[in-house]
Amino acid sequence: ALLAAAGITVEVLPADIDLRGLLTEVKRQLRRETDYLEEARSLQRYHDLLAGEPQLRVPRAHGDLTTRRILAMDHAPGVPVSTLWSEPHPQDVRDAVGHTVQRLMLRELFEFGFMQTDPNFANYLWSETDHCLTLLDFGSAIDVPPTLAAHYRGLLQAVLGGDRAVIRRRATEMAWLAPGERADRAEGLVDLIVLSCEPIFATGPYD
């Protein structure tokens, strides 16, 4: 049940993978996501971090009304960001939203040290009146340790340099690969990392 809640299908995982660490993290996240006092603190913290960002908005939490089972916050006007995929929204609006979210992700990782880890489309609202993106749902926000941010920085630098050997080494250091991993699995993961980073390093608009 925990794996299903995490969106993980056991059949697609290698038979020899050790799930103990994953299960521990899933349990921790589920506890956090059902504690609205904790989410209110994350909401306010994120609100303060984005105080100088005109394109981004985070509702304020209301501590006097929030309990462990009820989260009270400002009303957030806007339309679901998924509606931007179709007319009448112009391409430049879609491009601007994509740029804003990509920049936010890099700031979370390398500047804030604090990340919203559930970035599904339901957690973003687009305001057509002031061209602002509202962020919702901070039940799974986490601190990013400096060592982890350094690992990601090194990995991105390796991708930017096109050095597959360093990408594999970085992935091993981050425990994404076992030290003696099979070559086909290792190369498959390197391919996936390079593909995932394409939007970050592309020149100009990325489709």
Image (cartoon, helix red, strand yellow):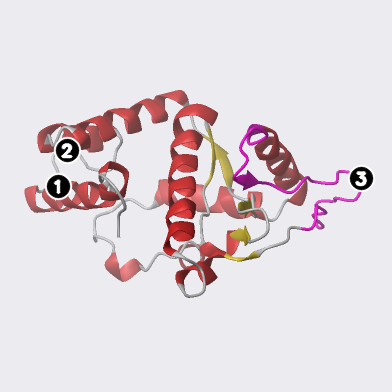
User: Can you identify the residue that label 1 sits on?
Assistant: 186
- Front residue of 45/48: it is 48
Q: Which region of the structure is painted magenta?
A: 49-75
Q: Position of residue 177 (x, y in %)?
A: 23, 42
Q: Position of residue 166 (x, y in %)?
A: 15, 31
- In the visual, does 149 lie left or right of 197? right
User: Can you identify the residue that label 3 sits on?
Assistant: 64
- Front residue of 129/10: it is 129
Graded by Cα atoms within 10 Å as few (under 14), some (14 to 19) or many (20 or more), the crowding at tag 1 reads: many
User: Can you identify the residue that label 2 sits on?
Assistant: 168
Which amino acid type corresponds to the residue marked 3 in the rendered image?
Asp
Please report contact status of discs 2 and 1: CB closer than 8 Å, yes or no: yes
Q: Position of residue 188 (x, y in %)?
A: 15, 53
Seen at 14% across and 44% down, the residue is 181
- In the rendered image, the quadrant that contains the C terminus is bottom left
Q: Main secondary structure of the magenta part?
A: loop
Q: Residue furthest left?
A: 183
Which amino acid type corresponds to the residue marked 2 in the rendered image?
Arg
Which amino acid type corresponds to the residue marked 1 in the rendered image?
Ala
> How much space separates mark 1 and mark 3, taking CA atoms?
51 Å
Q: Which mark is residue 163?
A: none
Seen at 21% across and 47% down, the residue is 194
Secondary structure, mark 1, is helix
Seen at 28% across and 62% down, the residue is 13
- In the visual, does 182 lie left or right of 148? left
